[in-house]
Image (cartoon, coloured by chain):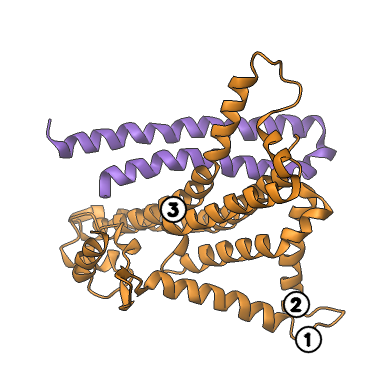
Chain colours: A orange, B purple
Amino acid sequence: MRSAGLAARTETNDGGLDVAAPKAGADGGTSMPDPIHQFDLERLFHLNVFGYDASFTNSSLYMVIVVTTIVGFLLYAMQSGSLVPTRLQSLAEMAYEFVAGMIRDSMGEEGMKFFPLIFTLFMFIFAANMIGLIPGTFTVTSHIIITASLALLVFLTVIIAGFAKNGLGFLKLFVPDGVPIYVLPLVSAIEVISFFSRPISHSLRLFANMLAGHITLKVFAGFIVMLMGAAGAVKLLAPLPLIAVVGITALEFLVAFLQAYVFTMLTCMYLNDALHPGH
Amino acid sequence: MDAASAKLIGAGIAALGIGVAAIGVGNLFGQFLQGALRNPSAADGQFGRLIFGFAVTEALGIFALVIAFLLLFA
């Protein structure tokens, strides 16, 4: 079912990744351009694995670009490995220290064994958000399947690491200290529900921010085209949404960093629960 | 009422949620400023928490915005 819907949408796609604004110009500039179009998936190479559609899509392509960018940047920046860092090397070291500082603040020194996971998560989300802000590109994190996979990865890591370190003591997470016995069932039920709703809010936050930000950008870009196509003196209002788009783009750069930071920060806090479930 | 107009009205109602998130964000920055003016030397150390709280609060408004967008465009 899903692949049929995908194919139907792919057929209507004329190959451009991001053609919302020119499309509006083509139909006279009176109708609203489609701001959802930028999130369409297109198959680049068709691939069928045991009846499942595992095609290489533009989403996969941008994930490859993101990972190549990160790995290339880190390898190139750390190439010299000198004691007095070059400009690029100090950038790479700043990224390392930023994530390491976050882990030390929330989990202490023993949390550093999760550093590879958390650094990878931060760099992937940050780079994906930033590359997605280049006009015409595809934002990997604007699809909930991507963010949900990342959140589930964190969720399962918390469960596995928690039981591996504390055994059944991990269940103390659901029994807070100092709660009177007669309200304990209620409190435990709330704790369990909040624990299991974590991956939902964790993934939805990143996904929704990226989706809403990019739709807002395209809606305001559409206003420019609509005003340009309008008759008479209304045309003169067209620069106003243009200024708004510049402002929103600046805000989106802030959001792109903040959401990567928040996702990583929450990962640290959840992993801290796995290490110290008592409180 | 046909489905299309119900969708538009629903999107408008969903957008109200953004205003409620705005109360939260305003409260957050107001309280931070109040605390920062009382003890300016401690303010810089709490900037990270401020930004964290902002992002988490703002996300709830964004959820409402996404519902509005989904009703309009999806």
Quarter occupied by residue A113: bottom right
In the displayed orientation, state which residue is furthest to the top: A182
- Give the amino acid type for the residue marked by disc 3 in the picture: Gly
- Would residue A74 appear left or right of B7 to someone viewing this image? right
Q: Which mark is residue A80?
A: 1
Q: Which mark is residue B21?
A: none
Cα distance in 3D space between marks 3 and 1: 38 Å
Q: Chain of mark 2?
A: A
Query: Given contact means CB atoms under 8 Å apart, are the residues at marks 1 and 2 in contact?
Result: yes
In which quadrant of the rendered image does the N terminus of chain A lie? Answer: bottom left
Cα distance in 3D space between marks 3 and 2: 32 Å
Cα distance in 3D space between marks 1 and 2: 8 Å
- Residue nearer the viewer, B33 or A130: A130
The answer, for residue A221, to whether it is visible in the render is: yes
Q: Chain of mark 1?
A: A
- Counting from the top left corner in percent of width and height, residue A258 is at 60, 53
* Residue visible at 64% across and 31% down in the picture: B30
Query: Given contact means CB atoms under 8 Å apart, are the residues at marks 3 and 2 in contact?
Result: no
Mark 3 = which residue? A213
